[in-house]
Amino acid sequence: MLEGFWRQYYAISTGRQTMDINDLKRVNNLWKKIYCYMALQIMEGYQRDSGKVLELGPFSGGISLELARLHPKLNITIADESAAVVKYLRQKISTSGLSGKIGVKKTKLNHLAFDDFQFDLVVFRGAFFFLNETLMTARRHKGG
């Protein structure tokens, strides 16, 4: 499943078995100036200015912050399975003043703790190539 693929890729590419929270911080800092453009591109494809958004993946956070800043009518949830990532994201969101716009939920990425069709838009950055056929089916059912 997704969790296993991500762990294997991460272990091979870094020599470590688990993702260090500092890696997420470095990636988000590195991409900080790019996230606004990614958010604009996402919204261009989405073609609405409101709705429920789910961001998930190994490098979550940066896009959601920009989406919330640029489109305040969005209701955004970030999902991750790491307690350390959830804690970091909650702190980052709080210091950005966007706590009322972005929520963070700890959940397995291969078995999300959300109802079907709960979100209008799903943003997945950082490991799209790890999705298997079962997870790709979710996209087809939603009509995207």
Image: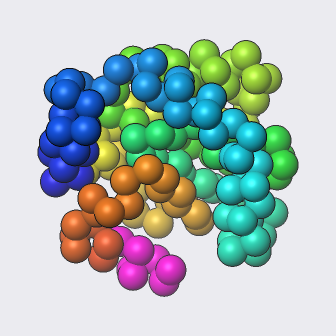
Q: Which residue is depicted at the point 47% across and 28% down?
A: 24
Pick the front one: 79 or 24: 24
Instruction: Point out residue 49 in the picture as x, y percentages from the top left corner.
Output: 81, 63
Q: How many marks?
A: 0
Pick the front one: 19 or 92: 19
Choose top left, top right, bottom left or bottom right for residue 81: top left
Query: 131 above or below 78?
Result: below
From the image, give the main secondary structure of the stretch colored magenta. Answer: helix
Choose top left, top right, bottom left or bottom right for residue 50: bottom right
Q: Which residue is depicted at the point 35% across and 20% down?
A: 20
Residue 67 visible at all: no
Choose top left, top right, bottom left or bottom right for residue 85: top left
Query: 88 above or below 65?
Result: above
* Quadrant, the N terminus: bottom left
In the rendered view, does 114 fall on the left or right side of 25? left
Residue 42 visible at all: yes
Pick the front one: 25 or 141: 25
Q: Which residue is depicted at the point 51% across and 19% down?
A: 88
In the rendered view, does 83 fall on the left or right side of 69? left
In the rendered view, does 90 fall on the left or right side of 132? right
Q: How is the image coloured?
A: rainbow
Query: 84 above or below 72?
Result: above
Instruction: Point out residue 5 in the picture as x, y percentages from the top left corner.
Output: 19, 49
Q: Is residue 86 magenta?
A: no
Q: Which residue is depicted at the point 69% across and 19% down?
A: 94
Pick the front one: 101 or 6: 6
Query: 39 above or below 33?
Result: below
Q: What segment is highlighted magenta in the picture?
A: 138-144
Instruction: Point out residue 74 in the picture as x, y percentages from the top left corner.
Output: 74, 51
In the rendered view, does 8 fall on the left or right side of 22? left
Instruction: Point out residue 126 in the picture as x, y percentages from the top left corner.
Output: 44, 50
